[in-house]
Image: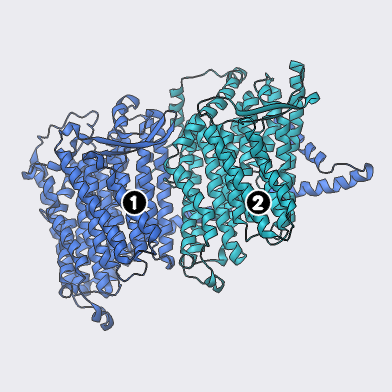
Chain colours: A blue, B cyan
């Protein structure tokens, strides 16, 4: 069975190749069946692989399948090889499972787009890249997937490339991600020259010998890698591309910019957890950056009016939680939240897509309202997603977020301030999500009759994935119920073989005082209730008060609405100077100075040779002067040196 | 057979010239087909080299060495190692592709054009096969003539300026090289009482450090101009912009590589002490070139000069890789020479295709081509991805190895060079957006037709190579390894004397790495 690992990413690649080469000859149905079918079969194989893996002894749950040697140069021996272990098994289940649902949804959502074939090509290519990312057995193969998903993200954000904003957003996403990739590569270089390998299992084995805990090499390497992760996983300072990425079709936002690609940074850190735990300084940076990103993005989310933008900032914020989990060495909690988030955020995005679909492509929540009666399935499933992300007790998001908050408070790398910020963010999350629900589905209708005529529930191909994802959002947390609530923490046990022991800490005794955990949980639930109540009070009961509230906080509102002017700042502080500097280099240095000297010498040569010609005819003009010039240059160099 | 094959390959194009001379100049079609035939035959013949090449043997293969001008010790000496083998393959491959691409581009003096192409090919092949300094010099100079005509006769509006600039820049360098060759010649005579220009004999000749410095500088200047490295690069954008498509393809694809090849074959092995002395200055020029080329490329208005400046940046990577003197960096450097030939060659072909349709290369003239020419824009995207080194394409393997090697060599340079990768994405994607995305606003673009079958045939082999080298570069890397190690060993000879001169005591390698890593401040990483 494990011989089939490579089939999982290969199938979408084959479908992409066939559809890409022959899409003009194939009918839309064939293209769609190939695209969806390949992902479906990949999902089935992933499930079988998962079952097979569980059947093994926990210590033996790491299977490497080497396909062929890729870049062998001296000590550097990189293979095209796939690694199946508990972590990648969970990841391929999420990627193919959620991916399959979103592919099915796309059939309905993209039905009227003339370019639907191209859409499915890109989606399949994305699946291949994402599966390569999570299955790669070395850092550079992971990087193939890493940049591959970035490329597909670029292509899909700019899918409607005739729109300038879409093309701009795609380009921005690619370039910002490239800035992160720069850090990724540097991190990989440091690791290779220090440890002599980039293969994960080998690295894990040699890391304790090759690196000193807290040493400069490991700290720098992990910091650079984390910088790479801030690009892909949209953390401060590189989060700016993700909100703009909403220009892409909504299934893309759900698949790439919520459930899978953006979690790649988290995945990479967890994959290399044995390195990160050796760099406490880096861990602190990760925790702080994650926490700050979670909070700041949530505040921006409060003031956005575009339904997808609210969800986009929400995604940035939730990714911040996952990063914070990594920063406090709660890697399992990070992956747990990654999984539950994949369910409920995909659900919310697809739900918002169904809303947009029914509203004739309107995305402004101020022009919605009262939709719950017209699109009941969408409403109910989105409500489930909202409850899940807000942390309603016993929903999936409740368990995973609670686990992160508890670790932020209690773990060796944790701090009460992280927990405090985290719990405030949770309150903000609840507030903006219910704001979204109330604005969209409750109250008076605020759209015109023309739109009203077309309001309709989405087709089955779209609602079925919503229902499945809603179910997963409810029960997805059950596999990770903590001991404190009488659960078995199965998820943690399953992932345990991948996680490294934290240096300087004794093995997890586990018998901490649970009172504190219950107190924090109670606080979390109260804050959830309070934020829900506040959102209900403002946006359900007294919507007129919102306007006066906005007016009384005009300054803050403007700041949040404009996203703290970070884009403007980057434009003025980085982009503009670089462009102007480049023009200077071209016009002044290149054309004026270097060419000026070259042409000047040419003129001198011509004039001199004309002088010389009078003295001695037959002189090989130019040659001699050039020779002299060269000699002078060399003498000059040797003297000055 | 084995000692004849290099001669046959090198001079097959000349045979083609003779054949073309027999065809009346009005019969344009048969001139084209004859040229294509001879370039294809040359390509196939060079493919035979691969099969007969012994991948594990060290030293030169297919050698032929017969006295030519005996009283001066000049010999007809050809031979190749795997480095020259790959460059020869690149040359024959790109010449055939370029020839096929010109079928509609040339508008007058067809016979002269194709004769120039064929003579150029012989010149290039001779440079890569010559193992005699005199022969090398002759081929090096011969090449200039057809290239001068290609730019000066079939070029754009400022073709004369560009052609003269190209020749003058190159000449300045090659004259100094000629002087240096003469100096070596007499040095060898002084030491051994024998006159020779044979590279194998001259390599390893014990030269004093100061003498090596002078000679390295003289050779090096010629090669630096050819590469071209900053600040000697300004001839390149002009030459590219004015040259016809085939000229640009060969110029970028092959001619630039000769500078790098010159360093590998002559400067490094013959003057190892000076190599160590010059590494700091060349590597810093390389890094400047990487960033400078990328930045200036970003603000170009003409697609061709954008690609030309991107070449300055890419060639900086290649030179940086070579200066690392470690296996990863040098192998990456040589592989990247091939990659750059493929991707930049393809870019020039693509630019040529819309130029033939619209007779403009200004970015602002275009927009929305993706909906007008979907196949063309897909091809362009793939080549673009290769050019900016996206993993899975050939460009990544080369850049990755170069940067990996550069990190060991000098971490700061590696970081600076890696920013070039970011800028590459900026200038390419920005250009792509302005040319291909958006709506078709310019009415002149509404009648554009997508790629023809011939154009697809021109590009498909390049696309295949892009993915093949990206996914399975192992055969090439394995092939290169012995030759690269040989060059490294030849340079290593100079290290002891260099260290002695500067009073350097060799330290443990791992300590160097650590201190390297510590030199880098973590600022800007959050």
Q: Quadrant of the N terminus of chain A?
A: top left
Give percent across and percent down for residue B248.
Answer: 63, 51
Disc 2 to disc 1, C-alpha distance? 40 Å
Image location (x, y in percent) of residue A185: 41, 40
The residue at the point 17 percent across, 40 percent down is A52
Residue at image point 70% right, 44% down: B15
Locate residue B5: give its quadrant: top right
Compared to residue B50, the image places residue A294 above or below, namely below
Q: Chain of mark 1?
A: A
The residue that appears at 22% across and 58% down in the rendered structure is A101
Q: Chain of mark 2?
A: B
Nearer to me, A27 or B272: A27
Q: Determine the residue located farthest toward the right in the rendered image.
A: A615
Residue assigned mark 1 = A13
- Which element carries disc 1, helix, strand or loop? helix
| Pointer 2 local density, CA inside 10 Å: few below 14, some 14–19, many at least 20 | many
Task: State left or right for residue A376 relative to residue B400.
Answer: left
Can residue B288 be seen here? The reply is no
Q: Which residue is mark 2?
A: B35
Q: Position of residue A317 (x, y in %)?
A: 27, 54
Q: Secondary structure at mark 2?
A: helix
Picture residue at 77% right of the left edge, 49% below the top: A600
Q: Position of residue A416 (x, y in %)?
A: 21, 43
Apparent side of residue A152 relative to residue B171 in the rendered image (left or right): left
């Amino acid at each position: 069975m494990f011989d089939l690992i490579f089939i999982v990413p290969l199938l979408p690649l084959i479908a992409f190749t066939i559809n890409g080469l022959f899409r003009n000859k194939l009918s839309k149905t064939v293209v769609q069946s190939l695209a969806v079918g390949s992902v479906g079969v990949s999902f089935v194989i992933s499930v079988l692989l998962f079952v097979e893996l569980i059947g093994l002894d926990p210590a033996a749950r790491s299977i490497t399948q080497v396909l062929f040697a890729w870049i062998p140069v001296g000590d550097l021996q990189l293979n095209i090889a796939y690694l199946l272990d508990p972590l990648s098994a969970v990841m391929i289940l999420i990627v193919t499972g959620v991916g399959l649902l979103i592919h099915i949804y796309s059939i309905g959502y993209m039905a009227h787009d003339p370019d639907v074939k191209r859409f499915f090509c890109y989606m399949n290519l994305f699946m291949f890249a994402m599966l390569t990312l999570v299955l790669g057995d070395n850092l550079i193969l992971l990087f193939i997937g890493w940049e591959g998903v970035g490329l597909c993200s670029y292509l899909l954000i700019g899918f409607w490339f005739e729109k300038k904003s879409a093309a701009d957003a795609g380009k921005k996403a690619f370039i910002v991600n490239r800035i992160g990739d720069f850090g990724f590569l540097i991190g990989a270089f440091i690791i290779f020259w220090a440890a002599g390998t980039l293969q994960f299992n080998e690295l894990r084995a040699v890391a304790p010998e090759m690196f000193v805990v807290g040493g400069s090499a490991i700290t720098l390497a992990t910091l650079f890698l984390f910088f790479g992760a801030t690009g892909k996983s949209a953390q401060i300072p590189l989060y700016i591309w993700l909100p703009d990425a909403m220009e892409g079709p909504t299934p893309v936002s759900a698949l790439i910019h919520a459930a899978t690609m953006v979690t790649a940074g988290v995945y990479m850190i967890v994959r290399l957890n044995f390195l990160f735990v050796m760099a406490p300084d880096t861990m602190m940076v990760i925790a702080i950056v994650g926490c700050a990103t979670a909070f700041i993005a949530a505040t921006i989310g409060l003031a956005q009016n575009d339904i997808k933008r609210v969800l986009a900032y929400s995604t940035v914020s939730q990714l911040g939680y996952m990063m914070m989990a990594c920063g406090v060495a709660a890697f399992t909690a990070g992956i747990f939240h990654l999984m539950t988030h994949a369910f409920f955020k995909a659900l919310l995005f697809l739900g918002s897509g169904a809303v947009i679909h029914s509203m004739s492509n309107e995305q402004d929540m101020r022009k919605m309202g009262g939709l719950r009666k017209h699109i009941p399935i969408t409403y109910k499933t989105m409500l489930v997603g909202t409850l899940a992300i807000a942390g309603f007790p016993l929903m999936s998001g409740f368990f995973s977020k609670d686990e992160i908050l508890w670790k932020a408070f209690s773990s060796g790398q944790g701090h009460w301030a992280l927990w405090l910020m985290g719990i405030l963010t949770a309150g903000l999350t609840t507030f903006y999500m219910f704001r979204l629900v109330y604005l969209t589905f409750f109250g008076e209708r605020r759209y015109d009759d023309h739109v009203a005529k077309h309001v309709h529930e989405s087709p089955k191909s779209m609602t079925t994935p919503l229902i499945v994802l809603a179910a997963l959002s409810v029960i997805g947390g059950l596999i990770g119920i903590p001991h404190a609530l009488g659960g078995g923490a199965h998820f943690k046990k399953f992932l345990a073989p991948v996680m490294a022991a934290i240096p300087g800490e004794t093995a997890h005794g586990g018998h901490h005082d649970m009172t504190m955990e219950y107190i924090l949980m109670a606080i979390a639930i109260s804050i959830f209730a309070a934020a829900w109540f506040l959102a209900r009070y403002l946006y359900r009961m007294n919507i007129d008060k919102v306007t006066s509230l906005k007016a009384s906080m005009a300054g803050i509102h403007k700041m949040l609405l404009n996203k703290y002017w970070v884009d403007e700042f980057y434009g003025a502080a980085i982009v503009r100077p670089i462009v102007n500097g480049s023009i200077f280099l071209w016009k002044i240095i290149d054309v004026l100075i270097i060419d000026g000297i070259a042409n000047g010498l040419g003129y001198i040569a011509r004039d001199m040779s004309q002088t010389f010609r009078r003295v001695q005819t037959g002189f090989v003009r130019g040659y001699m002067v050039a020779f002299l010039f060269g000699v002078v240059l060399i003498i000059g160099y040797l003297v000055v040196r | 057979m084995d000692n004849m094959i290099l001669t046959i390959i090198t001079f097959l194009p000349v045979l083609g010239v003779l054949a073309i001379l027999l065809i009346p100049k009005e019969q344009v079609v048969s001139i084209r087909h004859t040229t294509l035939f001879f370039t294809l035959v040359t390509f196939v013949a060079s493919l035979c080299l691969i099969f007969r090449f012994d991948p594990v043997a060290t030293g030169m293969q297919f050698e032929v060495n017969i006295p030519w001008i005996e009283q001066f010790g000049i010999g007809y000496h050809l031979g190749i190692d795997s480095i020259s083998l790959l460059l020869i393959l690149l040359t024959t491959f790109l010449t055939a592709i370029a020839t096929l691409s010109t079928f509609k581009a040339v508008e007058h003096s067809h016979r002269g054009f194709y004769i120039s192409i064929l003579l150029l090919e012989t010149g290039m092949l001779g440079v890569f096969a010559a193992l005699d300094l005199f022969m090398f010099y002759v081929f090096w100079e011969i090449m200039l003539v057809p290239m001068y005509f290609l730019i000066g006769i079939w070029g754009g509006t400022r073709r004369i300026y560009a052609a003269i600039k190209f020749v003058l820049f190159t000449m300045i360098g090659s004259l100094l090289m000629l002087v240096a060759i003469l100096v070596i010649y007499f040095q060898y005579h002084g030491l051994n009482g024998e006159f020779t220009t044979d590279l194998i004999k001259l390599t390893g000749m014990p030269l004093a450090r100061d003498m090596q410095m002078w000679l390295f500088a003289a050779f090096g200047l010629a090669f630096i101009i050819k590469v071209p490295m900053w600040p000697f690069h300004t001839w390149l954008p002009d030459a590219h912009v004015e040259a016809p498509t085939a000229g640009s393809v060969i110029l970028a694809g092959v001619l630039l590589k000769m500078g790098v090849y010159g360093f590998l074959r002559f400067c490094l092995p013959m003057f190892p002490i000076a190599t160590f002395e010059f590494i700091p200055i060349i590597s810093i020029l390389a890094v400047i070139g990487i960033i400078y080329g990328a930045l200036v490329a970003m603000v170009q208005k003409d697609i061709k000069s954008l690609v030309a400046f991107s070449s300055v940046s890419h060639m900086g990577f290649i030179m940086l890789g070579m200066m690392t003197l470690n296996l990863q960096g040098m192998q990456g450097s040589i592989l990247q020479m091939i990659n750059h030939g493929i991707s930049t060659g393809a870019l020039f072909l693509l630019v040529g295709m819309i130029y033939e349709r619209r007779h403009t290369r200004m970015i602002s003239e275009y927009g929305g081509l993706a909906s007008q020419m979907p196949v063309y824009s897909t091809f362009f995207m793939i080549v673009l991805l290769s050019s900016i080194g996206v993993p899975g394409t050939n460009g990544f393997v080369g850049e990755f190895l170069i940067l990996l090697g550069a990190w060991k060599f000098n971490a700061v340079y590696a970081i600076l060079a890696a920013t070039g990768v970011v800028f590459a994405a900026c200038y390419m994607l920005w250009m792509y957006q302005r040319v291909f995305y958006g709506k078709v606003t310019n009415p002149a673009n509404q009648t554009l037709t997508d790629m023809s079958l011939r154009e697809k045939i021109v590009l498909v082999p390049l696309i295949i190579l892009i993915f093949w080298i990206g996914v399975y570069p192992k055969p090439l890397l394995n092939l290169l390894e012995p030759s690269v190690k040989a060059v490294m060993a030849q340079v290593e000879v100079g290290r002891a004397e260099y260290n002695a001169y500067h009073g350097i005591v060799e330290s443990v390698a791992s300590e160097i790495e650590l201190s390297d890593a510590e030199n880098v401040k973590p600022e800007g990483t959050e």
